[in-house]
Amino acid sequence: LIPVPNLYRGLLAGLHSEADFRRFLAGIIRLLNHVHRADNTYLPYSMKQLSNHQEVLVLLWKAMDTNPDFLTFLLSQEDAINQVVVPILYYMFQARGKEARVGLVHICTFTLLLLSGSRAFGVAL
């Protein structure tokens, strides 16, 4: 494990197995897309709205920042970029013009900046 002051960040940085990355990414994608799917369902209130999307975005951002192997894995997956970027852009669009949601816009911006630092991100788009 990499010496990090926070135990959970240390454990996150210690992940190196592709199976762990795949499971983690699948959960993140499912949670990020839930709000978008719940808002755009044909039957109103047929899906319960989860309100933990900011925490999921912070977890994704810190996972990419702490573990460069995870960022490489994310960028190497074929459709994962679109499944991550679309909900991030959706959150930013929903939060536009709302002063109370400025933190959400910042988290989305940090995540997109971290992703856009790699050439593989531009190629994958």
Image (cartoon, helix red, strand yellow):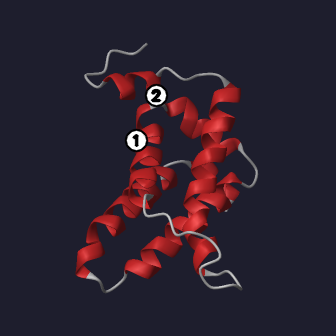
Question: On the rendered structure, is 101 left or right of 125?
Answer: left
Of the pair 41 and 48, the residue shown nearer to us = 48
Of the pair 65 and 99, the residue shown nearer to us = 99
Of the pair 63 and 31, the residue shown nearer to us = 31
Q: How would you rate the neighbour count of disc 2 (Cα within 10 Å): few for under 14, some for 14-19, many for 20 or more? A: some
Spot occupied by residue 63 in the image (x, y as percentages of width and height): 46, 38
Give the amino acid type for the residue marked by disc 2 in the picture.
Answer: Leu
Which one is earlier in the sequence, the residue at label 2 or at label 1?
2
Q: Residue at x 38, y 27 (%)?
A: 8
Local secondary structure at mark 1: helix
Relative height, residue 8 to residue 99 (above, below): above
Of the pair 103 and 123, the residue shown nearer to us = 103
Spot occupied by residue 33 in the image (x, y as percentages of width and height): 61, 63
Give the amino acid type for the residue marked by disc 1 in the picture.
Answer: Lys
Task: Say which mark, if any, is on residue 12.
Answer: 2
Task: Say which mark, if any, is on residue 62.
Answer: 1
Question: On the rendered structure, is 117 left or right of 69?
Answer: left
Relative height, residue 98 to residue 78 (above, below): below
Question: On the rendered structure, is 68 left or right of 26?
Answer: left
Q: Residue at x 63, y 55 (%)?
A: 30
Residue 122 seen in the current view: no
Relative height, residue 95 to residue 32 (above, below): below
Distance, label 2 to label 1, CA atoms, is: 9 Å
Q: How would you rate the neighbour count of disc 1 (Cα within 10 Å): few for under 14, some for 14-19, many for 20 or more? A: some
Residue 4, by quadrant, is top left
Q: Are marks 2 and 1 in contact (CB under 8 Å)?
A: yes
